[in-house]
Amino acid sequence: MQDKMLVTCSPGAAIMPKDDASFEELLEKADARLYKAKQRGKNQYCIDDED
């Protein structure tokens, strides 16, 4: 019997220079969008605060 593994992804992204200038600000926005995508369920994404 062969074992199977299913992997899903819910990414969040920030875009420079639109979102902010510093690495820390970009990381903070991407992290917040990651959690927004996860709240929507599996296999979702969030690139903008209005997504």
Image (spheres, rainbow, N blue to C red):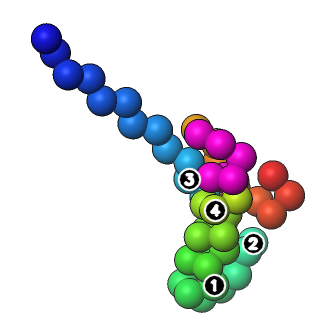
Can you give x and y, in whole percent of width and height, for residue 41 in the image? 65, 43
- Give residue 35's mark: 4
Q: Nearer the viewer, mark 3 or mark 2?
A: 3
In front here: 16 or 43? Answer: 43
| Image marks 3 and 2: residues in contact by CB distance under 8 Å | no
Point out the image quarter for the N terminus: top left
Give the Cα separation between the discs numbered 1 and 2: 11 Å
Q: In the picture shown, does residue 12 fall above or below 14?
A: above
The amino acid sitting under disc 2 is Lys
Q: Is residue 41 magenta?
A: yes
Q: Which residue is mark 3?
A: 11
Can you give x and y, in whole percent of width and height, for residue 34 in the image? 61, 60
Give the Cα separation between the discs numbered 4 and 2: 20 Å
Give the Cα separation between the discs numbered 1 and 3: 17 Å
Q: Which residue is mark 2?
A: 18
Q: Nearer the viewer, mark 1 or mark 2?
A: 1
**Of all residues shown, which one is farthest toward the front?**
1
Q: Which residue is mark 1?
A: 25
Horizontal side of residue 32 vs 3, given as left or right:
right
- Secondary structure at badge 4 equals helix
